Image: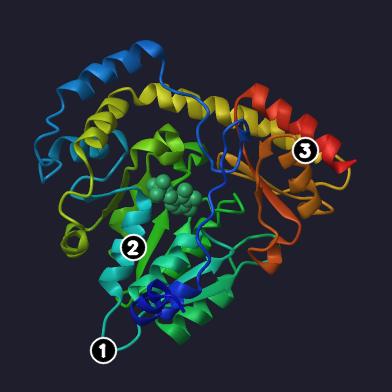
Amino acid sequence: MSSIDQLIANTIREDVRAIGSYHVPDASGYIKLDAMENPYQLPEALRLELGARLADAALNRYPVASYRTVKDKIRERMGVPAGYDVLLGNGSDELISIMATAVARQDRRAVVMAPVPGFVMFYRSAQFAGADFVGVPLKPDFSLDREAMLAAIEKHKPSLVFLAYPNNPTGNLFDADDMEALIRALGEDGIAVVDEAYQPFAQQSFMGRLPEFPNLVVMRTLSKLGLAGIRLGYLSGHAALLEQFEKVRPPYNVNVLTQVAAEFALDHIAILDRQAESINAERARLAAALAALPGVEVFPSAANFISLRVPDADRTCARLHAEKVLIKNLSKMHALLANCIRVTVSTPEENDQFLTALKAALK
Ligand SMILES: *Cc1c(COP(=O)(O)O)cnc(C)c1O
């Protein structure tokens, strides 16, 4: 063994060594439909204006620690109920990890729970924080298994339960009454995190319902709305609870460029909302075209992606890849996702290119 291998074996924890590296494929030259990005940029005039604002940002200074302006804009524009606080993350990925860290107590193993298949960061963050992750399978139609979730809550007493609304990678909205039953069952023993990363495409939200449930927090991100590159997530909930998470947050986790860009985008939120509307219209068109293909099963989506089942997902993905179209093969993620693939809804042109390539791939 070389000395660097020995060093790694002696220092890095075994469960980290055992994980394969997170592989992000090189997308240059590809139609990129694998990461739920908004295909549109801000209009040119606005980009120039943003450039000027960024030029004025004080890069020599640490960010203003309170993040007051951007938080106020989020409160105003995103329907945060009066009196509820906002916590900012370097993407909502960081918020997930902050929450997992905050609950991973030392005196007994804490449990983090989520329905599966779900967002991989729920599981990973729990693991890295030193908590146990319990995944409760969805039903085959991807709806919540309310009874199984209630039984798992009773048995494992999770400190944190993640519910993605809509869910990734399946795309559907869970039944709101089922969610309410779970949030109530957690009561004073567990925090329910409703992850609304896809809220701009869903028109459904638990944000306005925060006052009904003291143990509820609602998490969102600007990523899927069209600003994946700036990395800004936010979490809303009872101020006393967020104050605890604040202690775990690295003090200057959101950088000044992100802060300026986010404030600018929030001032022009109507443009992003219009982009989301056109993506929703394309989602309906794409879903209908996919449903008309023989051998294809399309799952309902309230997000900016569509999940579908094809006869042979590995073959379909390989063929699409050869045609320079990147999508996500979900087959290996979970037994419920056998032969499923996930495609981001993009511009009409890219959606057509995908449809053409898919039709050829299915032949
Ligand atoms: C994409 C996604 C996120 C991550 O968002 P970032 O803010 O970009 O870190 C969180 N939750 C779900 C369910 C997602 O699909």
Tell me, for residue 290, which label it has, or none: 3
Query: Counting other residues with Cα less than 10 Å from the Cα at mark 3, is it few (<14), some (14-19), or many (20 or more)?
Result: some
**Residue matched to label 1:** 107
Kind of residue sitting beneath label 2: Ser
Residue at 35% x, 82% y: name it.
10
Of marks 3 and 1, which one's residue comes earlier in the chain?
1
Q: Are marks 3 and 1 in contact (CB under 8 Å)?
A: no
Nearer the observer, disc 3 or disc 1? 1
Residue topped by disc 2: 97
- What amino acid type is highlighted by mark number 1? Asp
Looking at the image, which is closer to me, 242 or 313? Answer: 313
Marks 3 and 2 close (CB-CB < 8 Å): no
Q: Quadrant of residue 273?
A: top left
**Who comes first in sequence, dot 1 or dot 2?**
2
The location of residue 200, given as percent across then percent down, is 46, 37
Residue 166: % across, % down: 52, 50
Residue 298 horizontal/vertical position (percent): 74, 46
Q: CA distance from mark 1 to mark 2?
A: 20 Å
Helix, strand or loop at label 1? It is: loop
Number of the front mark, 3 or 2? 2
Task: Give the camera-side residue of 126 and 57.
Answer: 57
Spot the residue most to the front: 2
Residue 359 occupies which quadrant of the picture?
A: top right
* Separation of residues labelled 3 and 2 (CA atoms): 36 Å
Q: Is residue 60 left or right of residue 249?
A: left
